[in-house]
């Protein structure tokens, strides 16, 4: 995974509460066995008409949302089923950071495991960022080591993250990477077991 330290990116707004994982990635696309290629199906039922054309009124289809890598969303983002495809589709679409007042716990953990940083801020701060994000030239800066979000007009907000996940994201580690750090000790233990089994 790519490390996240100080991240600067363009925001997009999805001002909707209780966005569930079936809306993030509808069930008909879960048959894929790859972890990539889900971005084109992100928010599929909202992004596209029945004939396959883009819905002009959907937030992410607006010109100001083009190229965004930070999603600013409403309360309880990622509720519903535990499908890991939801963060896969967000990341494949191009989102590296999701900011919302709150997240569903399983979705939040799935994001962290897959290298997406979910940031919970107060509803007031999220509302402010949503308004600012509507300007086409605005960018937000996320300082993960110092746990701060920077926006326009000297906006600064602190956020919480568990030290374990912070270390994982800053270093670009997944849980396999953590295990491989103990490769020498694991090999030594396995060799000990082999010796004992031959006695």
Image (spheres, rainbow, N blue to C red):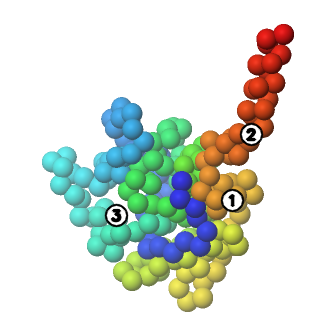
Label 3 neighbour load within 10 Å: few <14, some 14-19, many 20+: many
Q: Is residue 179 left or right of residue 114?
A: right
Residue 186 falls left or right of residue 138: right
Q: Nearer the viewer, residue 199 or 136?
A: 199
Corner quadrant of residue 159? bottom right
Disc 3, disc 2: CB below 8 Å? no
Q: Which residue is mark 2?
A: 184
**Front of the two marks 1 and 2:** 2
Q: Secondary structure at mark 3?
A: helix
Q: CA distance from mark 1 to mark 2?
A: 25 Å
Q: Is residue 162 in sight in this rendering? A: no
The residue mark sitting in front, 1 or 3, is 1
- Provide residue 144's location: percent of width, then percent of height: 65, 68
Dot 1: what SS?
Answer: helix
Res 60 label: 3
**On the picture, is 21 further left or further right than 6?**
left
Q: Residue 64's spot in the image, x, y percent?
A: 33, 75
Quick one: label 1 or label 3, which is nearer the N terminus? 3
Q: Give 189 or 24, whichever is nearer the viewer.
A: 189
Q: Residue at x 55, y 81 (%)?
A: 151
Seen in the image, is 119 located left or right of residue 56? right
The quadrant of the picture occupied by the N terminus is: bottom right
> Which residue is located at x 55 percent, y 76 percent?
141
The answer to whether residue 95 shows anywhere in this view is yes
54 or 165, nearer to the observer: 165
Q: CA distance from mark 1 to mark 3?
A: 28 Å
Residue 33: percent from left, percent from top = 39, 33
The residue pinned by badge 1 equals 166
Give the residue furthest to the left.
51
Query: Are there few (<14), some (14-19), or many (20+) residues within 10 Å of tag 2?
Result: few
């Amino acid at each position: 995974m790519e490390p996240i330290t100080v991240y600067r990116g363009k925001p997009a707004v999805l001002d909707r509460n209780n966005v569930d994982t079936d809306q993030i990635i509808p069930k008909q696309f879960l048959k894929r066995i790859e972890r990539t290629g889900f971005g084109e199906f992100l928010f599929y039922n909202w992004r596209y008409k029945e004939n396959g054309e883009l819905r002009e009124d959907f937030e992410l289809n607006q010109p100001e949302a083009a190229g965004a890598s930070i999603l600013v969303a409403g309360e309880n983002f990622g509720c519903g089923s535990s499908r890991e495809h939801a963060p896969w589709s967000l990341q494949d679409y191009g989102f590296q950071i999701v900011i919302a007042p709150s997240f569903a716990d399983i979705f939040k953990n799935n994001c962290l495991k897959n290298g997406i940083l979910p940031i919970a801020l107060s509803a007031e701060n999220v509302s402010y960022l949503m308004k600012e994000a509507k300007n086409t030239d605005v960018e937000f800066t996320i300082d993960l080591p110092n746990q701060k979000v920077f926006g326009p007009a000297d906006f600064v907000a602190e956020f919480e993250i568990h030290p374990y996940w912070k270390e994982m994201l800053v270093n670009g580690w997944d849980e396999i990477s953590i295990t491989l750090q103990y490769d020498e000790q694991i090999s030594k233990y396995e060799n000990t077991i082999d010796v004992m089994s031959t006695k």
